[in-house]
Amino acid sequence: MEKVIVIDFGGQYNQLVARRVRECSVYCEIYSYKKPLSEIRAMEPKGIILTGGPNSCYEEGAPSCSAELFSLGIPVLGLCYGAQMMMHVLGGKVERASEREYGRTGTHFDVSSKLFAGVPENSVTWMSHNDYISRLAPGFMSVASTANCPVAAAENTEKGLYALQFHPEVLHTPNGKDILRNFVIDICGCSGDWEMTSFVETQIREIREKVGDGRVLLALSGGVDSSVAAALLSRAIGHQLTCVFVDHGLLRKNEGDEVEAVFGSEGTFELNFVRVNAADRYYGKLAGVTEPERKRKIIGEEFIRIFEEEAKKIGAVDFLAQGTIYPDVVESGLGGESAVIKSHHNVGGLPEHVDFKEIIEPLRDLFKDEVRKVGLTIGLPEKLVFRQPFPGPGLGIRIIGDVTAEKVHIVQDADAIYRAEILDTAREYEKEYGHSPAWMPDQYFAALSNMRSVGVMGDERTYDYAIVLRAVKTDDFMTADAAELPFDLLQRVMTRIIGEVRGVNRVLYDISTKPPATVEME
Ligand code: XMP
């Protein structure tokens, strides 16, 4: 398969580089700069992109690459640090600039360069560098400049080498996508005919080759990543795959049954589906536990125990499959290197007593939206593919204080009403205006406060729980604002929850930002 390889030097935008390449319908994988050149060459990439990074290339011990990389006959594009390193390694000079160049920067392009075809002569680029290329390596010429930076881009067309001081991968460089497309399609000669269906076909073939007649075990949570992994593996190896789905009784209303409807015997996927209904076991373990971290730990550990018990019943397997996706790999700080293990539920660790030889992670090069595309391509229902993020410990951390079956039912019912009302209102709006409303939250759910307060229902005094509604707008979940839900929507939700959910007499709307609050309650 035609592919471009991104070599990771630790820059903050590396995920974006790979993503932009895939947006050109060219398959792309990221590897650490430590990956041996022989392995890179063996993959026969059509092009190589070197990313930015936090170092100075002239410092001792700075991440580097061998000069040989530039004479493989494969076009190479260096970005920021990657550009400087290319110059440094090939005999140019990189020095500390007197002034850091940062932010949107007016840039003049030599539009006769193939790289800048279709780009206006004067445009803007996103710069973020302390060092600059003070002397070009032999054979290169400068093809872009800014007021402070004589070499904003350089090329050696004979060797197919291109260097950009700026970041074409970020949206702040308005013509960045065009520049990357010029490199990938026109310079590397990629045909740009890759699509998710080809990814799916290749993965299915590779999984079959790898697994042979072996057996694979997967912990299915019902979340997007593990569901897509399960679906992909099922298409590849059918009943050689066993999925263990632990229903911990802390899922959203009807969710356990929804997962079973997709993957169980009534669904369209061929696999062995094992559902473990462990609600009572969890409620037992959680009884009287109020401290949030302890709750999380219990939920995570119990999952591992149950998974191990099930694995024991199945016996030795050849592979343990995981729905690890690229951001998980990055979060773990290991870049494109050796297998990274995503601990289920992000707590509790990996099963120690499951007998398997190897890990299989078919989604580890993809981003979340790409994983969703794969899910749709292989026939998972939209409802599952576009699920909101849901924490591994589930409703366990949306019930403040101790967890009981009664509280779980209260929060499940309130949450189902809240989500349905938001979706209905948003759908109505979309029908009328053709786009989703500005207030549409990125995540929304009901939680159960541990507070009970006095109310009056009919002629009776009540002493019941308060439900907390949360709805946040966020780009990355690191920071978040409360969504400005329409007041009449909130009122409708309040009326329904108090009317339909026994044990609730108050509904509160959480307007806290993150930080200092978090998205979840615990
Ligand atoms: P917080 O509460 O940390 O949430 O502001 C940020 C995002 O992470 C989700 N979240 C979790 N996801 N396991 C997960 O898989 C967890 O333990 C967990 N805790 C929070 C949360 O739903 C939000 O999207």
Image (cartoon, rainbow, N blue to C red):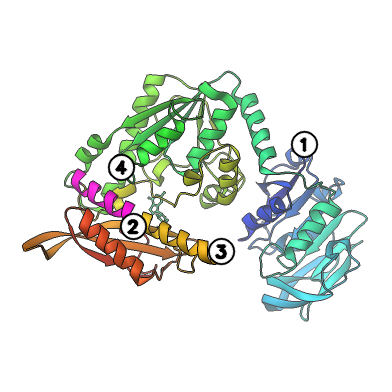
Residue 508 is labelled as none
- The crowd level at tag 1 (other Cα within 10 Å; few <14, some 14-19, many 20+) is few
Residue on which the image places disc 2: 418
Label 1 sits on what residue type? Ala
- The crowd level at tag 3 (other Cα within 10 Å; few <14, some 14-19, many 20+) is few
Residue on which the image places disc 3: 434
User: Toward the viewer: 100 or 464?
Assistant: 464
Quadrant holding ligand 1?
bottom left
Tell me which numbered mark, 4 or 1, is placed earlier along the sequence.
Answer: 1
Label 4 sits on what residue type? Ile
Label 2 sits on what residue type? Tyr
Residue 42 is labelled as 1
Residue 288 image position (x, y, % from top left)? 16, 47
- The crowd level at tag 4 (other Cα within 10 Å; few <14, some 14-19, many 20+) is many
Residue on which the image places disc 4: 299
**Mark 2, mark 3: which one is toward the viewer?**
3
Q: Quadrant of residue 460?
A: bottom left
Separation of disc 2 and disc 3 at Cα?
23 Å
The verdict on label 3 being within 8 Å of ligand 1 is: no
Separation of disc 3 and disc 4 at Cα?
42 Å
